[in-house]
Amino acid sequence: MKHVAHPPSRASFPVVAVLAGLLATGCGAPPQSASDGDAVDPGRAKIATAPHADWALAIHGGAGVVRSSVSPEEEPAYRASLEAALDLGSGILADGGTALDAVEAVIRTLEDDPLFNAGRGAVFTNEGTNELDAAIMDGSTLACGAVTGVKTVRHPITLARRVMERSPHIFFSGAGAEAFADEAGVERVAPEYFFVQKRYDQWRAVVEGEAAEAQGEPADDAEAQGGEDKHGTVGAVARDTHGNVAAATSTGGLTNKRWGRIGDVPVIGAGTYASNASAAVSCTGIGERFIEHTVARDVTARMEYGGESLQEAAKAEIHEVLEPESGGLIAVGADGSIAIEFNTEGMFHGSGDSTGQRSVGIWQ
């Protein structure tokens, strides 16, 4: 396995000092309850668990979702999928498994679920194809791996982990990533495997709406409906019983994306980041905004160098740095605290830890 040492600036900022700073800034406050559907102050973290949980896990299935895009029949299915993914990851962590194994397992199951914009449920590009991105990061070493633009890899998150562990590099793209998948023994599938009728219909609605606008006609309701699911991602962050954190994120990107566009997910520090000195973070939303502000790394930097708690850092990034409707993030601190923040109407999310806290929700 590739090992990446902490840079000197990290070594001069010991974990003990970081945790002391977190406790001093209120990270040890009693847990907040946030029942889904309750009125929640958008300036507060959705979840704030007590520190020092033996293990903790948070997951997301994408931000930017609006109520009109989720039918009454679909909502229970989304919740059931989140519950199943949360059960899987929680079981691994409760049995003493690693944070890396937990987040990879969670993402693999979500990549297989056509409800989410990752893996089999990926949205369509302008060319009518599916292009997948993923990244994973080990907070104990800062080792990381990422892939972008893959079209025939069933589980991009597993390929990203192989890049991290079995290559001297960090970031592979397109045909090169798929060639490496063969060498690393990662499962490949025919491009047709990723076809999902709902995603295809959304893409066609967007394409037809753009064509109408190009001719000076107003976009109809179908185009607007298709545009509601233009972005989305799945992510998982965890702290294990060994005290290590990890983050993993996977996505199909934006509906109708062009020219090999790459979002924040595989960009380490933008959509995915993990460090035992602070936290593991996974983001979702409009990738360009998260890249501009290096949101995932910024959350951890606020903690490491500014002494902010995980909740304070997550709140500031989502509600003060980013514009409204940009997206959201999940994060697990090195102390076992959890933060879930989003500035959109909805974000599929869930969390749980060894203290018994557990939550699954969609709406703000």
Image: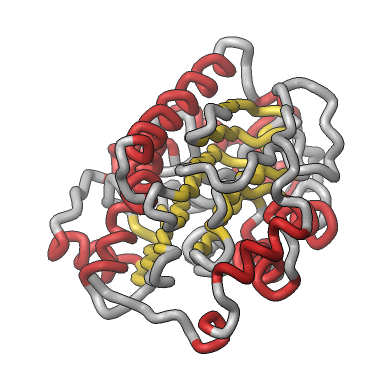
306 is higher (above) or lower (below) than 229: below
Labels in figure, total = 0
Q: Residue furthest top?
A: 73
Q: Nearer the viewer, residue 273 or 325?
A: 273
- In the image, what residue occupies the spot 58% across and 18% down? 75
> In this view, which residue lies farthest toward the bottom?
8
In-image side of 335 versus 95 (left or right) = right
Q: Residue at x 29, y 37 (%)?
A: 193
In screen coordinates, is 63 left or right of 313? Answer: left
Identify the residue at image location x=25%, y=67%. 165
> Which quadrant holds the C terminus?
top right
For residue 120, side relative to residue 318 (left or right): left
| Quadrant position of residue 287 | bottom right
Give the x, y percent position of residue 188: 20, 49
Task: Locate residue 314: give its quadrant.
Answer: bottom right
Residue visible at 19% across and 48% down? 187
Is residue 159 among what the camera can see? yes
Q: What is the quadrant of the N terminus in the image?
A: bottom left
* Depth order, front residue of 208/161: 161
For residue 269, what is the image quadrant? bottom right
| Left or right: residue 278 compared with residue 249 | right
Where is residue 116 drawn, in percent x and y? 48, 35
Q: Nearer the viewer, residue 76 or 32?
A: 32
Res 120 seen here: no
Q: Position of residue 154 (x, y in %)?
A: 28, 45
| Nearer to me, 202 or 285 | 285
Color encoding of the figure: secondary structure
